[in-house]
Amino acid sequence: MARFIIALTIVVVTVITRISCCDVVKLTFPSGFSLGTASASYQVEGAWNVSDKGVNVWDYHTHNRPELISDGRNGDVACNSYYKYQEDVALIKKIGFDFYRFSISWSRVLPTGFANVISEDGLQYYKNLTAELVANGIEPVVTIYHWDHPKVIEDMGGWTNELIVGWFVDYAEILFEALGDSVKRWITINEPDSFCNGGYNGVRKAPAKQIPASIGKYLCGHNVLKAHAKTFRLYDEKFRETQGGEVGIVLPLKAYLPFNASYEEEAETAFQFNCGWMAHPIYHGDYPDVMKTRVALVSEYQGYPWSRLPEFSDEWIAIINGTNDYFGVNHYTSELVYPDPDEEQGIYTYDNGLLTTVDSSWAASASDWLYVNPSGFGYLLRKIRDEYNNPPVWVTENGYSDSGELDDYNRISYYYEYVREMLIAIKRDGCNVEGYAVWSILDNFEWQDGYEKRFGITYVEFDDADTNRTAKLSQTWWTKVLSKRKLQSVPTSTNTRTRLPWKK
Ligand code: PNW
């Protein structure tokens, strides 16, 4: 009898949980939830040398090392958004997004790289764009830095020179002053891991400096944290009271899943090396213990008299701790983690001691690093909830690449599955996600992949002088989602439009 009652209880509880799960997860967006779309200056603006704009590291990189870009092309023209911003805003409005996340080109605003000269034209462009958004009821969300710092600053070591901290804060202050009446959500820095690793530990990103053994990468991250924190403190001291906005950093986060059940600890280590590297100092005061221990160990093994991971003074720890009004997440994909077998032979190759792979069941995209695993998104959001005391989260990028299909069913399916996971994480698991942005409103210059990998919900004809825009099916789908504030099913069709003619 007792057994029967237990069994019955389990059945009843399961049914109730299922019902309440489905009830809460109706695939509607919570009221007040913000849905937007995103871009970045170098990827969309073009107009690389108009007026008094200074040269930035991406201008220099693409002009001087075209062999590092898969199609040898550059952002000189890109989507022409510098000239077409009104058309862009009209499109964003027509689709129905609540906010537009764009970034500001440092060398367009400060042609010399420093605060001694402010470009009237450069600043005016961003004032116009912001005003156009506000006039159309779209909230501007501004990224202060999305990888395109002035070349002159790189000549002095860029993100490996601590002086960049002060130069960055000068630049940010000019933006707060000029735009802060309208802009209430600021992103200091987009994805440190991407440009610190890609730019100072390899050649995938500008400035393509191959500084050995992650020394450049860690130094870059160290200065990023200082620049972010000092900018946050400046906002606190001079602008928060009058402008009342929010300031945060955006991190590129993969879901690191254990390859099998015995590798939970390895997955945790991978998370700390990826997310914890930036988030632990901001939420808990210093680099994660596992990072400090492992980098010190491998550095010693390699004969360095010091750890390649720099240390923060107590003063810096206090400055950095607590400098996020919200947690910015760019999420695209997952990886499976397992230990590097060489370590059993005492050979230490990787600071985190790990290798990664993907599951063969995950669908591919056009990008070599992006495989589709929607459940990883929910996993990551719950991990952030648990690790950082359930902070407000803004998903500042999520998206899928193909080679330009107009009837982009794969992209729609990606969005359906990923956004569904997010809604479950919010409604069932109590994750405090407040906003979500589609990457991207337009096909654009995809860094080392040139124009060959397309993330847009809108097709752009890069070969045409008019850089015409054409709606993809995913744009139509998002329009419906936004008008209903509810996820819509994925359409199926046999009538697939091929992509537009594409010249190399
Ligand atoms: C982001 N990952 O980069 C950038 O912020 C965008 O500028 C870029 O166009 C977009 O994603 C697509 O690449 C990422 O490996 C690059 O997980 C790689 C990863 C995440 C984000």
Image: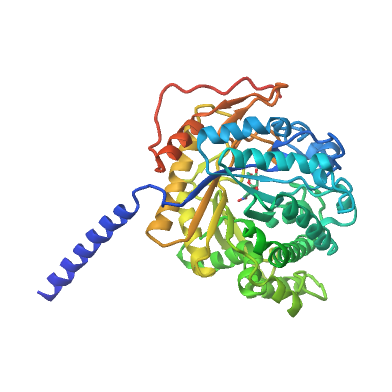
In this rendering, the answer to whether 95 lies above or below 354 is above
- Residue 340 visible in the current orientation: no
Which x, y percent locates residue 500?
59, 21
In the picture, measured across the screen, residue 7 lies left or right of residue 18, that is left
Query: Extreme front residue here?
Result: 242
Closer to the camera in the image, 275 or 263: 275
Closer to the camera in the image, 21 or 345: 21
Tell me, what colour scheme is on the image?
rainbow
In the picture, measured across the screen, residue 247 lies left or right of residue 484, that is right
In this rendering, the answer to whether 86 lies above or below 18 is above
Query: Extreme left residue here?
Result: 1
Q: From the image, which quarter does the N terminus lie in? A: bottom left
In the picture, measured across the screen, residue 97 lies left or right of residue 114, that is left
Which x, y percent locates residue 221?
73, 62
Query: Extreme bottom residue here?
Result: 314
Q: Residue at x 79, y 33 (%)?
A: 47
Closer to the camera in the image, 82 or 299: 82
In this rendering, the answer to whether 488 lies above or below 309 is above
Q: Quadrant of residue 77?
A: top right
Closer to the camera in the image, 359 or 71: 71
